[in-house]
Image: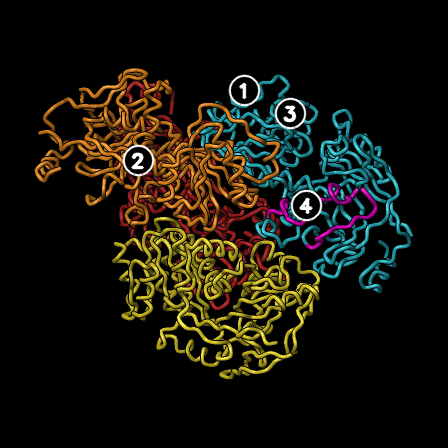
Chain colours: A red, B yellow, C orange, D cyan
Amino acid sequence: MTTAELELATTNATTLNVSANTMQALVYHGPGKRAWENKPRPIIKDPGDAIVRITTSTICGTDLHILKGDLPSVTEGRILGHEGIGVIQQVGTSVSEFHIGDRVIISCVTACLKCDFCKRGMYSHCRHGGWILGNTLDGTQAEYVRIPHADGSLYSFPSGGDEEGLVMLSDILPTGFECGVLNGQVKPGDTIAIVGAGPVGLAVLLTAQFYSPAAIFMIDLDDKRLAVAKQFGATTLVNSADGHAAHHVMELTEGAGVDVAIEAVGIPATFDICQGIVAAGGRIANVGVHGKPVELHMEKLWDRNISLTTRLVDTATTAMLLKVVRSGKLQPKKLVTHRFAMHDIMKAYDTFANAAKEGALKVVLTNDAPRG
Amino acid sequence: MTTAELELATTNATTLNVSANTMQALVYHGPGKRAWENKPRPIIKDPGDAIVRITTSTICGTDLHILKGDLPSVTEGRILGHEGIGVIQQVGTSVSEFHIGDRVIISCVTACLKCDFCKRGMYSHCRHGGWILGNTLDGTQAEYVRIPHADGSLYSFPSGGDEEGLVMLSDILPTGFECGVLNGQVKPGDTIAIVGAGPVGLAVLLTAQFYSPAAIFMIDLDDKRLAVAKQFGATTLVNSADGHAAHHVMELTEGAGVDVAIEAVGIPATFDICQGIVAAGGRIANVGVHGKPVELHMEKLWDRNISLTTRLVDTATTAMLLKVVRSGKLQPKKLVTHRFAMHDIMKAYDTFANAAKEGALKVVLTNDAPRG
Amino acid sequence: MTTAELELATTNATTLNVSANTMQALVYHGPGKRAWENKPRPIIKDPGDAIVRITTSTICGTDLHILKGDLPSVTEGRILGHEGIGVIQQVGTSVSEFHIGDRVIISCVTACLKCDFCKRGMYSHCRHGGWILGNTLDGTQAEYVRIPHADGSLYSFPSGGDEEGLVMLSDILPTGFECGVLNGQVKPGDTIAIVGAGPVGLAVLLTAQFYSPAAIFMIDLDDKRLAVAKQFGATTLVNSADGHAAHHVMELTEGAGVDVAIEAVGIPATFDICQGIVAAGGRIANVGVHGKPVELHMEKLWDRNISLTTRLVDTATTAMLLKVVRSGKLQPKKLVTHRFAMHDIMKAYDTFANAAKEGALKVVLTNDAPRG
Amino acid sequence: MTTAELELATTNATTLNVSANTMQALVYHGPGKRAWENKPRPIIKDPGDAIVRITTSTICGTDLHILKGDLPSVTEGRILGHEGIGVIQQVGTSVSEFHIGDRVIISCVTACLKCDFCKRGMYSHCRHGGWILGNTLDGTQAEYVRIPHADGSLYSFPSGGDEEGLVMLSDILPTGFECGVLNGQVKPGDTIAIVGAGPVGLAVLLTAQFYSPAAIFMIDLDDKRLAVAKQFGATTLVNSADGHAAHHVMELTEGAGVDVAIEAVGIPATFDICQGIVAAGGRIANVGVHGKPVELHMEKLWDRNISLTTRLVDTATTAMLLKVVRSGKLQPKKLVTHRFAMHDIMKAYDTFANAAKEGALKVVLTNDAPRG
């Protein structure tokens, strides 16, 4: 935003004068079909709304699932995307914490802050929000987005902040941290294992180190991903291609197993590894999105004093994560491997969809400066 | 113990003079076979041992499993029983917390207190103990028993204590409290459900009330047991005979489900009820002993922010429970429905094995005064 | 509210037609001066506001302090009162959780829900609210009150609810529960002591029993108050008039002291009792409002592994308390000793100001049905 | 210990043949008087004892206090020292976790593991132990020491371990970690302040980083110590010599104060800084040993939702700390500035007593190889 625009914003008090009513966005047109096309610019509908001009966004594994048609809640015509950073263009009359011109991180989870779940910090289950962006509402892979319940769903950051790193706070870092690290109760000196070295597993890896575990086993089928995990702080790599990952971990821990086993894939085989390696008194923290039931070996686990947790990210720790990023103790930018202009998002999707071949982790999208 | 005996004990300094080397005990002779017969009296083997003359004991559901041959760790010739109250006859040289003549509750779990698990309070996984009485060591359904690691495995109580109630502290009350109530994190105002109104489920029910839940659903197939649960404080009864218990609970909670679902049976069907009724953000606490895997619906639960816990009782809360019993806020005696002399233990087993028909909950066994 | 009124409300969609612009209220006119007089009726100022017609209110010890001139934040002309129950007459455009005609409990603490403190559940330190009613904003001892941030500051209850009991949820019960019981981490089997058997101390006493402590010492100068405490569940009474309360408690606990010492007065002498009786490993939870420093005996306490907590009530547990009240496990009405019509509030203040003489605990005020 | 000795040990099964009955030790002879002199070698007295040949020891600030005569519990003739590492020479009959030849860390706190406090992990208040070494029993600044309750008071480590670093696990690291970091509940992203950059404050600093706080203020009078703190990870240094440390911290935090204020000195002035800088909702964790009462500003703190904790180190986290040291995430050796042979302990004391002038943090003492 230029100085002139900001002045204009100040003059208008509540809205930034924009010259056109349309924008471009990535639109879902049914399984396998997507297009970068013109759409109307969003406008304020409710007093708690904010309109954000997107400067940076990214693609999530969930977006690929949507494109496959796996999520019936996403209907044709929907603008995808639930991660992003941008500049506030307009705010509704009840928005009190944000102002036009503020640079903000958009949480993937929308929180009204008022319902019983929000009051418990379970924003994921907000009765008026939750994960709705790029799902039941138009999302962030666009030039502009409407954010309902803006006061509960946006986070400010100072202008010096690096957007490439900070956009990881929209979803992947709180997901890894809340579902994996906090639910797994990682403690100093713990031995932990992360099953799945994809972007989410790596987000677990980065944030688990906040608590100084003594040993971090990283388990994956792909040696390239494991090599990245090593760079990110994993202490032991286990390639699970031979089907004996659990056995290897048990040997490496001299039969004790791990204090925390974190599932970051979402299939029965990886869940099985977790239940095969968790120590007596340990925790299994599920991060992966599951599409099928798993067989839980209660006949072995009933007397093992373990806990198993599930969680949809609440983004309740975004403020904490932002503090750690600012302190320099976390460099989320490490997760970014590819960069595209937003209008090249069709190419970006191709790259991300072939992550293994392309060596892609997170693919960052940036919008040009705003038009006229 | 008489005054004369006590004087004798004092005179001998470390051992009570007993006139015979034999005793009677309930002995396992392979699947389906048990006998009340003569056995040698136990003697001190290790410095941490205590020899306890049993005054009160009881039978556990696990004892019935042993008799069916379900537990290969229990071999022929083993004296059964892991619950009991008695008087200390003799202590090893390193026993510091107990003395001859002390009346003690025997924990079903033996704790060395020194190993890594014991230091974490996970006595159930003690590297030198755990559940060994009536399992890999001779147990408490006898006139005398040797208790290894006595300082970690016994609890004193004053002579006025009611043994019938206190013997419930050996196993069933800490089991219900630790595995069900503490793991389930029952809080004031919670809505909880207990699946299974047998003795263990009722122990959950009694101890859950320490935390003032607002509603307690009790779920069972047997209306008689449900009626007992009502008397013990359950607020809503659900007979699960129609196979729709989960549906009923969801209706009764207007679709919300329960904050805590406690499994106190140990079969897939009852586990299923729990996963069908747990609210978003809720806890499933498993108490039942499972013999088979269960199907865990991760495709429904992955985003529900739930926790599932397992635990073998640690008897780490025995001192706390003893305080609550003394305060009168817990009357464990309520669980006792039948009483037998120890030498009638064969009949007691018959009664307990036909619990439904006999209306039996816990069956208490008492030894006569010691012989000469 | 009558059916006709409700219909009217529905017709008007956002406001109840009221025939006059004035109301009566209890107004502070400087130290020692108060009057029941005419004031303009409050109107909606911000989108988050609600206007509530007060049906029930009460007087707090803090109101007496205000009248003495102890709180400089309260200026002349202020309507007093921060507790109350009423019916919503009007809501601002951003109020989403409440509607005209809803019966509501008004929390003494106003919570915007959006600021950093509110997101942590520390509503007492809300950057836009906190304790402002009857302090820096006009309060509840009136016919009508404007409640800012209504969605964070009101709690619904069904029409059957007993207002006399429920008005205790505005302040005194959450104060006792949060500052005393939760901060003191009262656990089953604990020995606790409450210093001060006034209304707040009794609120601690009532809510401490949610957690089944084994022994509750109640300490006060006034035998009449102690007798009430006995009726409310205290197990041991200690009259502190002889200046040796700490000594008595230490004798009664055989030198161990108490697991939790709860200060519910707010002067150095009562704080001293707490630090004199807290056991090694225990907690001191301060509830009282202090006007002076205290001498903390760090030379005795530094190695005692204790914690000392302070807290201004957050009313973060109102929903939980409401569930317990509904379940019948808490009868807050017990705290009510006197009842007045709101227009007799001058007399009510006189009674409450002479609580000891009058045997007064909480004094309830009720408004007549609304005028035309 | 040589191979020959070990063989000898093995042959003797329970005791290592030692050629003499005397040893040398640092003996307290009343205020200001100490001597390195001959004393009888300790022998096994109780079944739980172990005799340890000291290889490494160090001097604690508490030892200086003893020498000043500040601790009446320490009587003339006492061998000082409660920190040390050594080799087990002999074990009593009930010691099960350690064997002759094991290299062990000696905890400054002796834990019977059996009493009520030990069962709660509060070893500092053990009814049969606690801090007794170099206090009421002969200590570790000697060639040999008797360790009662050896199974609860010693920790094994593999022969490769660096004794200079590991001897910091006897006292200073668990003290900083338990009393400061754990009690202060340091969390990722927190802003913390440590008042006192002496050895204990630096131990807090090192172990606080296990939890990734965003900012660490270090407050001290001495710029040299502050410079060390900077090297050890402090992010902001505040010299308190001008008497305005609290003011500076409040300015640097823009009036918010710190999430955790850790007192590591033990005088009213430094305690005052802590209560002046703790944020609403924050924690004050006391580590320092206090000799006088402090003035606690309850008139300011009562409504600030803070906690204040005290603790004598329990050494309950030694196993955890050992894991972190082994992982390389903690280098306790950094604390060692000076090294002496044990027989030069008189010089070592002189150096440590002039810590500021000598730039001394921890002074390590090593014994020669055992004689004959």
Distance between mark 1 and mark 3 Cα atoms: 14 Å
Which residue type carries mark 1? His
Q: Give the class, few, some or many, for how many residues have Cα within 10 Å of label 3's Cα (few <14, many ≥20).
A: many
Q: Main secondary structure of the magenta part?
A: loop
Q: Amino acid at mark 2?
A: Ser
Q: CA distance from mark 2 to mark 1?
A: 37 Å
Rendered image: mark on residue C170: 2
| Contact between labelled residues 4 and 2, with CB atoms less than 8 Å apart | no
What amino acid is labelled 3 in the image? Answer: Asp
Mark with earlier residue (1, 3): 3
Q: Amino acid at mark 4?
A: Val
- From the image, tell me which residue sits under label 1: D247
Q: Which mark lies nearer to you, 2 or 1?
A: 2
Q: Is residue C195 left or right of residue C300?
A: left
Residue bearing mark 4 = D109
Q: Which residue is mark 3?
A: D220
